[in-house]
Amino acid sequence: MKIASWNVNSLKVRLQHVLQWLEQEQPDVLALQETKTEDSQFPLEAFTESGWEVVFSGQKTYNGVAIIAKSLPQDVVTDIPDLDDPQRRIQAATVDDVRIINLYVVNGEAPGSEKFAYKMDWLQKVTAFIESQIETYGDVVVLGDFNIAPDERDVHDPVKWKDKILCTNEERNCLNEILDLGLQDTFRLMHDDADHFSWWDYRMNGFVRGYGLRIDLVLATEELSETLAAAWIDKTPRGWERPSDHTPVIAEFDW
């Protein structure tokens, strides 16, 4: 089972990129973030005509999530207890007996800001939701744009990024609380070295110069992780014309 995540930074702009990647890679599941598309405007037929099933939750201009799969996602959830949030950042669904939790984590703007405090609260409530999903479903994959670089290996310049947004101890502690629920970072089960990134800033020619962060993750419960066959970052779409600033991350399970 091949499961992937991709922040596409506008599905309207990157629809053909997504369709091309789906055709080439044939994942069982692709979770999208930052679709920036209202539900009434979602290009559903573009996917169904190619044989894909899709569930989505969006809004105009900002945020938005979707799960694209070879089989119809079931038991779909887009709002969670105790989090009164109109932003479309959360989606959970079951695909082939695996519970998929698709997250577009709040950016947080800057440490000490109101948006940073909101990010901390958001993560705490989402962590409680993930815990409940693991208790209910067993085999769970939590994936998406986490807007957190797990450790210094995931940052092109740890000194420059020290204590900056996406790299603070507070954010990493929140991520570790999610991992402590019994989840594994699938990429790190396969790759221990530094300088693997999933996001590069559009500014300063970041992709070409290697100025990136690994903030897009695929986390899996321990039993599911035991069947992990491969995990990788596909940098190819980042080099396409008018690319997203993120690129797909993938985990493949042999079960």
Image: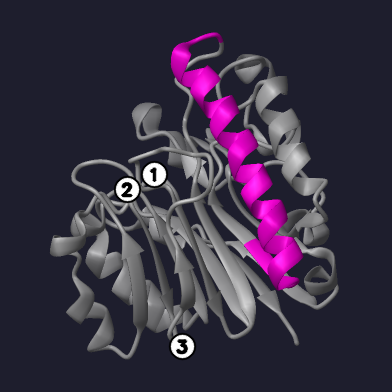
Q: Is residue 245 visible?
A: yes
> How far, Cα to Cα, is label 3 from label 2?
25 Å
Q: Residue at x 59, y 85 (%)?
A: 96
Frontmost of labels 1 and 3 is 3
Which portion, as a residue range, is magenta? 112-141
Q: CA distance from mark 1 to mark 3?
A: 28 Å
In percent of width and height, residue 204 lies at 38, 26
Disc nearer the start of the sequence (3/2): 2
Q: Is residue 209 left or right of residue 174?
A: left
Marker disc for residue 245: 1
What is the basis of the colouring in this image?
Answer: one colour
Circles 2 and 1: CB distance less than 8 Å?
yes
Q: Is residue 5 above or below residue 160?
A: below
Task: Nearest to the eye among marks 3 and 2: give it.
Answer: 3
- Check disc 3 and give the amino acid type: Ser
Vertical order, 46 against 49 (above or below):
above
Query: Label 2: which residue?
Result: 9
Q: Which SS class for mark 3?
A: loop
Which residue is disc 3 drawn over? 71
Q: At x 35% / y 54%, what residue is drawn?
A: 8
Among numbered discs 1 and 3, the one appearing first in the sequence: 3
> What secondary structure is the magenta-colored segment mainly?
helix
Which quadrant is home to the C terminus?
A: bottom right
Q: Nearer the viewer, mark 2 or mark 1?
A: 2
Task: Looking at this view, name the residue that lies furthest to the left.
Answer: 41
Q: Nearer the viewer, residue 160 or 26?
A: 26
Q: Let me know if residue 180 is in the magenta part.
A: no
Question: Gap between marks 2 and 1, in whole Å?
Answer: 7 Å
* Residue type (three-letter) at the residue carrying disc 1: Asp
